[in-house]
Image (cartoon, rainbow, N blue to C red):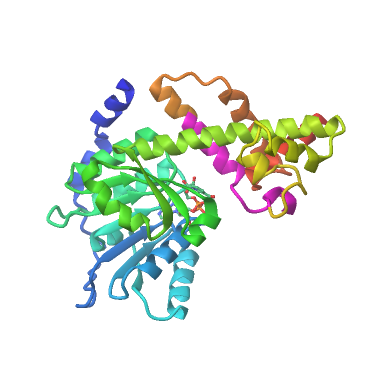
Amino acid sequence: MPALRHALRRAPAAWKSACNRQSWTSVRCFSGSPMTQANWGFVGLGQMGYPMAKNLRAKIPATDSITIYDINESATSQFVEEANSAGPGASVTIAKSLQDVSRSSDTVITMLPQPKHVQAVYEEFIAGGLDKSNPRLFIDCSTIDVKTSLEVGSSIRALGHDFVDAPVSGGVVGASAATLTFMLGASDSVVGKAQPILEKMGKRIIHMGNPGTGIVGKLANNYLLAMSNVATAEAMNFGIKLGLEPKTLASLINCSTGKCWPSETNNPVPGVVEGAPSSRGYQGGFGVSLMSKDLKLAIAAADLAGAKLILAEPARKLYEDAEAHADCKGKDFSVVYKYLQLADK
Ligand code: NAD
């Protein structure tokens, strides 16, 4: 893909100047205890990052230390409180700044909402000065676009550090249970370093190939999920409107060729799958805004590759419209079924 190679070659000018700035203000010394074996950093303690960091802390030696940072201070203070009440374990420090995290850690994991957040956070890491004599490993687990991930990765590698993309599948449930699937984009020489770390937070680590390929895999999967969710909602909607009983229709689909994750596990029709978000007012699950974001990222990835997408545009509009609707906003992405019904009226 020539466009991808082109993206890799371009080192963003703003970042180069950030590296030269060498902002040494607000440096905080992390002396650590003499017993400290390894220093970990975790940035982004949201729905996914919080339980991931919790699992990481539970599985690293008690002599290690973990430095956490989130712009939401209640998340970091809650993390410390929970860690204290959990008893002995790796020490937890709340960093005063992002630069504290990158300077004090050997391994830094980031779990952030969007490309702009990942870009800004890594700009700060770089602006803080990353000592070449202590090569660090940066693992970005956020779902972002291919181009940003490649640019961030090449800026970090240019400074002598490792960067891998490792987006996840499995949602909040998988993050809490440490059963996530990681899609790892890393050069062969870095896989061995990243894998044992990711295994502390997940069950399956799939090495997709070189940097950037973890993101490509994640976006391809979520594109398919975005489509199968809409198709399931549409098929269930017209089937029910033509008189079929919802559970009977779902049973038929689930032992026939239409079977997919939305039909079987996350059926969008309330009452069909007990425990699915649709059966509890579409609460929890994978937010419609996150699916809307991922679909746009997948569209951008296909554009980079020059790959034609036929189904993307109407689905993009449907997710965007559902996200904007007062009755669907903030709900699980299967809420598109409800949106279709509202639109039918
Ligand atoms: P979230 O919004 O719950 O958490 C993101 C966290 O990042 C928040 O706590 C926020 O305060 C913090 N943050 C934002 N900007 C920051 C900055 N500059 N510095 C430090 N912290 C900052 O999001 P989430 O649901 O945890 O998702 C994180 C990523 O994982 C997203 O890219 C998402 O697409 C992906 N993902 C989410 C799910 C899911 O089910 N929620 C599943 C798979 C993948």
Residue 33 higher or lower than 166, as above or below: below
- Residue at the extreme left: 133
Quarter the C terminus occupies: top right
Q: Give how far across and how far down residue 253 sits, in percent.
A: 71, 35
- Magenta-colored span: 276-298
Q: Is residue 86 left or right of residue 18?
A: right
Dominant secondary structure of the residues highlighted in magenta in the image = helix
Quarter the N terminus occupies: top left
Residue 245 higher or lower than 239, as above or below: below
Q: Give how far across and how far down residue 88 sits, in percent.
A: 38, 80
Q: Quadrant of residue 245?
A: top right
Front-most of residues 320 and 25 = 320
Q: Is residue 118 left or right of residue 123?
A: right
Q: Give how far across and how far down residue 308 sits, in percent.
A: 48, 18
Is residue 315 visible in the rendered structure shown here?
Answer: yes
Is residue 95 visible in the rendered structure shown here?
Answer: no
Residue depicted at 68% across the width and 37% down the height: 255
Q: Quadrant of residue 247?
A: top right
Q: Quadrant of residue 196?
A: bottom left
Taking the magenta stretch, the answer to whether it contains residue 282 is yes
Image label count: 0
Residue depicted at 49% across the width and 57% down the height: 175
Front-most of residues 61 and 17 = 61
Front-most of residues 20 and 285 = 285
Q: Is residue 115 left or right of residue 278?
A: left
Taking the magenta stretch, the answer to whether it contains residue 217 is no
- Residue at the extreme right: 243
